[in-house]
């Protein structure tokens, strides 16, 4: 009669319950570990004894062979093994399993994929690499022991065939393999992006060396600020690096955004809010024409319908709204700032980002010989010059208007009267050939 077995350290733990079940099964059939080993034909008596010791978690195939040799319920023993595996945080790999491993649907890089595959192998009972090779071969797949070992130790499968062979060796059903293939594809795409970023970094270094103003081939703070302002932005923090995000402010609409100096040099940096600002101003102007407050007289509404709103500009807390005026009568009516409060009210409903001071700029140009008859012509010239985006309401043509060119338009000096208080009206005179939205809508 052999020596009695050592007591199970913790018989109420999941691992202890599995060991108690295996010991009871062997006692019921009355076999020694040597006789039990002969029944399994491939597992040594020492391995079977350790499986029932309650000290270490056996491989799933060992526990199943133990149960089969003792005529036990193999499904029940398999359930007990999985409970013991979950309770021991990975069995023999508990020392490395302190952190939860990612699921395959959350895999995005190489390390997480390898960790998920190793967890899968251990959840399947941590079969030996020889056993995994045999399982793959039986299913018609090719998986060598060395390949299975490399994958288990952190090397991603080289192909979907290798991945599928590994999954087969871990006894993953076909319907559950799709999520693993998708994870593998994500890892491959991430690797391609990483290579492209490395190549792009080398290209950026060469571009920076071309525009650099220092001996080290880097752009200085002063040069970076000059490039930034030339592109229409103002720095909100110190310049750090050529390819580092930089917090800037748009000089056109005062929007805050993050760009890279490399994008500025490559003319790929643009403010997404500038078109939105002009769009909001035009929407507000269209609402103003409906006279929602009822404070505007019919004469002012008619004058507002006869003008054209040009691209607006919000710089710091000043909103410049340039307006093209086609005739002197309209100019005289709109030179009064009495209608500005109504415009402010509708603008605040459409531009809610920050408080602002309204500054209206009346842009006009009249021929001294025929001022009222040249209004429609000036509007057409402004549109051809790119100054006018799209008039809200075109002025009706004058009957009997002379269609021939009555003479060259004299070039006048463009100017702008400084406003001392917010909401003041400013007028500017310029020629159609020199009309530009930036010069007419603010400094």
Image (spheres, rainbow, N blue to C red):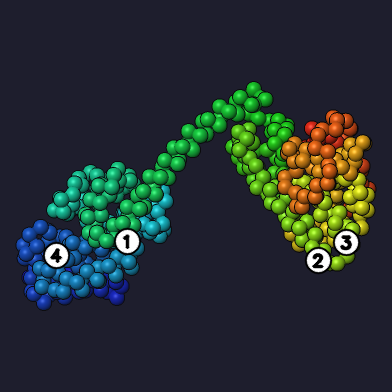
In the picture of the structure, the residue carrying the numbered disc 3 is 298
Q: Determine whether 402 is above or below 1 in the image.
A: above
First reached walking from the N terminus: tag 4 or tag 3 = 4
Between the residue at mark 1 and the residue at mark 2, the CA separation in whole angstroms equals 71 Å
Q: Are marks 1 and 3 in contact (CB under 8 Å)?
A: no
Report the residue at 81% width, 54% height from top: 305
Q: Do the residues labelled 4 and 2 touch (CB within 8 Å)?
A: no
Quadrant in the picture for the C terminus:
top right
Between the residue at mark 4 and the residue at mark 3, the CA separation in whole angstroms equals 97 Å
In the structure shown, which secondary structural element does the residue marked by tag 3 occupy? helix
Q: Are marks 1 and 2 in contact (CB under 8 Å)?
A: no
Q: Determine whether 228 is above or below 95 in the image.
A: above
Q: Quadrant of residue 81?
A: bottom left
Q: Who is closer to the viewer here, 316 or 194? A: 316
Q: In which quarter of the image is residue 411?
A: top right
In the picture of the structure, the residue carrying the numbered disc 2 is 292
In the picture of the structure, the residue carrying the numbered disc 4 is 65
Report the residue at 24% width, 71% height from top: 79
In the structure shown, which secondary structural element does the residue marked by tag 2 occupy? loop
First reached walking from the N terminus: tag 1 or tag 3 = 1
Please tell me how crowded label 1 is: few (under 14), some (14-19), or many (20+) other residues with Cα within 10 Å: many
First reached walking from the N terminus: tag 3 or tag 2 = 2
In the picture of the structure, the residue carrying the numbered disc 1 is 90
Q: Where is residue 344 in the image (x, y as percent from the top left)?
A: 83, 58
Q: Is residue 275 among what the camera can see?
A: yes
In the structure shown, which secondary structural element does the residue marked by tag 1 occupy? loop
């Amino acid at each position: 009669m052999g020596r009695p077995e050592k007591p199970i350290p913790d018989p109420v733990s999941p691992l202890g319950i599995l060991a108690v079940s295996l010991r009871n099964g062997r006692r019921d059939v009355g076999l020694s570990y040597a006789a039990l080993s002969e029944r399994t034909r491939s597992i040594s008596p020492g391995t079977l004894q350790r499986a029932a010791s309650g000290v270490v978690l056996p491989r799933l195939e060992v526990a199943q062979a133990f149960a089969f040799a003792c005529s036990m319920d193999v499904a029940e023993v398999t359930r007990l093994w999985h409970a013991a595996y979950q309770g021991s945080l990975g069995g023999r790999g508990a020392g490395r399993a302190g952190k939860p491993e990612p699921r395959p649907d959350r895999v995005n890089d190489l390390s997480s994929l390898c960790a998920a595959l190793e967890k899968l192998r251990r959840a399947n009972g941590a079969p030996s690499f020889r056993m995994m090779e045999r399982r793959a071969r039986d299913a018609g797949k090719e998986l060598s022991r060395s390949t299975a070992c490399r994958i288990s130790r952190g090397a991603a499968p080289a192909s979907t065939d290798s991945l599928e062979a590994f999954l087969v060796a871990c006894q993953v059903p076909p319907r559950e393999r799709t999520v693993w293939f998708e994870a593998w594809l994500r890892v491959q795409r991430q690797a391609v992006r990483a290579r492209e970023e490395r190549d792009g970094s080398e290209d950026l270094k060469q571009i920076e060396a071309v525009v650099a103003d220092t001996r080290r081939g880097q752009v200085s703070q002063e040069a970076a600020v000059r490039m930034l302002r030339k592109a229409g932005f103002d720095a909100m923090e110190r310049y750090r690096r050529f390819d580092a995000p930089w917090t800037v402010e748009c000089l056109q609409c005062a929007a805050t955004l993050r760009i890279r100096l490399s994008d500025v040099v490559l003319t790929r940096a643009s403010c997404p809010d500038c078109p939105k600002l002009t769009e909001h101003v035009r929407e507000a102007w269209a609402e103003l024409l409906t006279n929602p407050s009822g404070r505007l007289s019919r004469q002012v509404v008619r004058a507002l319908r006869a003008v054209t709103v040009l691209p607006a500009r919000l710089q710091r807390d000043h909103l410049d709204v340039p307006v093209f005026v086609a005739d002197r009568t309209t100019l005289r009516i709109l030179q009064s700032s009495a209608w500005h409060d109504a415009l402010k009210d509708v603008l605040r409903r459409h531009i809610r980002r920050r408080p602002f001071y309204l500054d209206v700029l009346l842009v006009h140009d009249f021929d001294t010989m025929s001022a009222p008859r040249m209004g429609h012509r000036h509007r057409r010239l402004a549109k051809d010059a790119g100054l006018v985006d799209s008039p809200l309401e075109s002025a009706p043509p004058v009957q009997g208007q002379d269609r021939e060119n009555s003479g060259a338009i004299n070039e006048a000096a463009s100017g702008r009267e400084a406003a001392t208080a917010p909401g003041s009206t400013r007028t500017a005179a310029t020629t159609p050939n020199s009309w530009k939205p930036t010069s007419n809508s603010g400094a």
